[in-house]
Image (cartoon, rainbow, N blue to C red):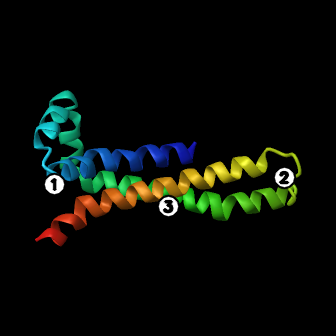
Amino acid sequence: MLGWVSLFTSAGTLVCCALPSLLVLVGLGATVASLLSAAPWLVTMSQHKGWVFAGAGLLIALNVVYVYGLTPRLRAAHRTCPSDDGGTPCGPAERFTRVMLWTSVALYGVGAFTAYGLGWLLT
């Protein structure tokens, strides 16, 4: 569940703050205007982008702690999912969770760079 929430919030940072800036940068200001008229809640999210990025960063950090810190200890303590993963669903599930985690990190990084770093870089 934490992985899905992290992915959702990091995608939210991308949609609220990075995508409009990127569209304006490439000359698609009319697209941004129509997007904001169709989804006016994006304006509110972008006004509070500090909180949005802080919340998404916290959830992603919690997910990193869960995937790399808590899960291996729980697996060892309860002796679930043998190390060879011969036919158990643990291997594919663990890979899927890690892919979701690093996709969230990548989306968050793109959103943070566009929201905070791109303006500074262009000036």
Q: Secondary structure at mark 3?
A: helix
Residue position for label 2? 81
Where's residue 21, x and y in %? Answer: 19, 52
Residue density around tag 1, few if under 14, some if 14–19, many if 20 or more, within 10 Å? few
- Tell us which disc is closer to us: 2 or 3: 2
Q: Say which residue appears at 38% left-offset and 61% top-offset.
A: 109
CA distance separating discs 2 and 3: 25 Å
In the rendered picture of this protein, how many numbered marks are placed on residues? 3
Q: Position of residue 32 (x, y in %)?
A: 16, 40
User: Which numbered tag is attached to residue 61?
Assistant: 3
Which image quarter is the N terminus in? top right
Q: Residues within 10 Å of mark 2 (few under 14, many from 20)?
A: some
Q: CA distance from mark 1 to mark 3?
A: 30 Å
Front position among marks 2 and 1: 1
Residue 88: percent from the left, percent from the top? 84, 46
> Is residue 73 found left or right of 119 in the rendered image?
right
The numbered mark, 2 or 1, whose residue comes first in the sequence reads 1
Query: In the rendered image, which residue does mark 1 sit on?
Result: 25
The kind of residue tagged 1 is Leu
* Relative to 81, 17 lies left or right: left
Determine the residue positioned at 12% across, 36% down: 33
Which of the two discs, 1 and 3, labels the residue nearer the N terminus? 1
Q: Amino acid at mark 3?
A: Ala
Identify which residue, 63 or 85, lies in the foreground. Answer: 85
